[in-house]
Amino acid sequence: MVNAEAFRNAINQILDDSQNKGLSFIDIRAGDLHTALGDYPGPKARMPSCCSVMRNLRDAEDNIISTPLKGNGANLVIRYRLPRKKTTIIKTNYEQLEARIPREDWFTIKFQGLFARCPDISDLKNLEQLTRVDPQSAVIKIRIVAEKISQRICEKQNLSSKNVKFDDLCFIISDHQILSKKAMNYFHSIRKMGNVFAHPLDSNDEKITEADVMILTQALFAIVEECLDKKMI
């Protein structure tokens, strides 16, 4: 049976091939993607997973061209802009921080300072300990807090956030240009990594490290600081 990782790999391969051809965008249709990988149409089809991966890999510049009435279906079409932007968090800042301040002290100092102004990050209180035991769960927890922050931002801007998924909240914030591009890149990094590690059965080859968790933590704290400075939460 085709799984989410297979869909991710197939989309990334299509994007790489299209970029190498010099294209400025490529439209991917869920039905065509699923058929190319097999199992569709048929009893083993995993169209919801296919559509979910397509949406998860979407960046702020990408557009949904067609959406099925039920949300997931063969006629979901997303236009991916090329070349792809590297949505990565540079490790240098964190490494320099760690060289000056022990990781535990940095987290405690930063967390306590932000928690006094933003109680929504309370779920991260024991993140340092969780990271040592289960980095994957730590990433998921960071994603949950980021989702809560995105809901607060939308509420502050009188934008509908009730029953809206984190993926869509990120694009709503991006479309309205509420935060800086750097903050939105951080949001999308947390969103994508959180989506991958929320489905361990589909990502057995993925390994998360303690350093990865702390980099995402730094990204989340940067988002919170910008939101507080702009009075967005």
Image (cartoon, rainbow, N blue to C red):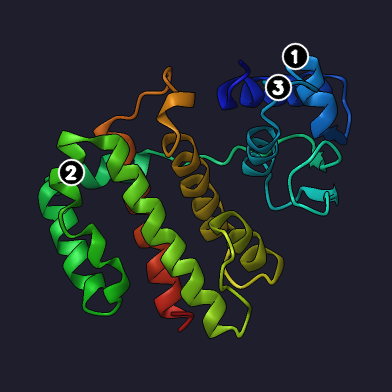
For the point 26% across and 36% down, the residue is 135
The numbered mark at residue 38 is 1
Say above or below: 106 vs 72: below
Measured as percent of width and height from the top left, residue 26 is found at 86, 33
Residue situated in front as seen by the camera: 60 or 123: 123
Q: Nearer the viewer, mark 2 or mark 3?
A: 3
Give the numbered dot on residue 212. Answer: none
In the visual, does 220 lie left or right of 27?
left
Disc 1 and disc 3 in contact, CB within 8 angstroms: no
Q: In this rendering, would 7 be left or right of 136?
A: right
Earlier in the chain: of badge 2 and badge 3, it is 3
The image quadrant that residue 149 belongs to is: bottom left
Question: Label 1 sits on what residue type?
Answer: Gly
Q: Quadrant of residue 227?
A: bottom left
Q: Quick one: label 2, few (<14), some, or many (20+) residues within 10 Å?
A: some
- Is 62 positioned to the left or the right of 198 in the image? right
Q: Is residue 22 left or right of residue 82?
A: right
Which residue was labeled with disc 3?
43
Q: CA distance from mark 1 to mark 2?
A: 39 Å
Numbered disc 2: secondary structure = helix
